[in-house]
Amino acid sequence: MNLKTINIKPIHSLIDFCKIWAPLYPDGKRDKEFYFPALEAKTINEELLLGFFEWKNGTKLSTLKKASLKNKILKLEVINDLRDRETVDLKKIRASFPDVSDIWLITLAHLINPDAFPIFDQHVYRAYKFLELNTVDIYDYDKEYNRLKLYRSNYLPFFLEIVHDDIIGRKTLDEAFWTFGKFLATYHRILE
């Protein structure tokens, strides 16, 4: 049997990292259908909001999730008011949406102000942990009550520091982190 060797070359810059990982991002079609229309809309309506959360969910929303979204998040006047503000912080968003899970709150914050609040999920967090701390362990992420704290204290400053100089676009960076994090979830054993 003639087995091939896989050589993993070191990546020396974040630009190179993004050039490798962002093109492998698989959801470009769904981004065009759900993500960009919501972010580019002057006013969010129910259809855009449901589509945006469907995009985040990765699949059609179940009846239960859709009902939860409508009960807890479908406050279009509040969302559009927050989007119109020059600045808004997570505390204000949390005060307006007290019953929303941390991940859906962060997703909503991204919809309200995508420049200030990057998307956050297990895959981008895993990429962050590997790049910053050389581990793929995301045990701390698995605790629902801890996610907003992890986002605010760890991932948000890390992400905003990287995009501060505008060399790499926020969406490109998110796509690279998501793809790399998803890769690590599946193939992390080859890196040990």
Image: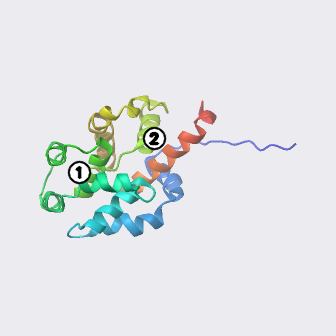
The percent position of residue 99, horizontal first and vertical second, equals 22, 43
| Picture residue at 28% right of the left edge, 40% below the top | 157
Q: In the image, what residue type sits under mark 2?
A: Ala
**Quadrant of res 3:** top right
Mark positioned earlier in the residue sequence (1 or 2): 1
Badge 1 is on which residue?
A: 72
| Picture residue at 16% right of the left edge, 42% below the top | 91
Q: Nearer the viewer, residue 53 or 19?
A: 53
Residue 134 relative to residue 68: left or right? right
Residue 183 relative to residue 35: left or right? right
Q: Can residue 54 be seen in this view?
A: yes
**Quadrant of res 33:** bottom left
The percent position of residue 51, horizontal first and vertical second, equals 35, 64
Check disc 2: other Cα within 10 Å, few if <14, some if 14-19, many if 20+.
many
Query: Coloured how?
Result: rainbow
The percent position of residue 18, horizontal first and vertical second, equals 47, 52
The percent position of residue 116, horizontal first and vertical second, equals 24, 51
Q: Nearer the viewer, mark 1 or mark 2?
A: 1
The quarter of the picture where the C terminus appears is top right
- Real-space CA distance between mark 1 and mark 2, rounded to the nearest whole angstrom: 30 Å
Q: Which of 60 and 104 is in front in this view?
A: 60
The quarter of the picture where the N terminus appears is top right
Residue 9 sits above or below residue 79 on the image: above
| Secondary structure type for disc 2 | helix
Badge 2 is on which residue?
A: 127
| Secondary structure type for disc 1 | helix
Residue 25 sits above or below residue 91 on the image: below
Q: In the image, what residue type sits under mark 1?
A: Lys
Could you tell me how many numbered marks the image carries?
2
Q: Which of 65 and 94 is in front in this view?
A: 65
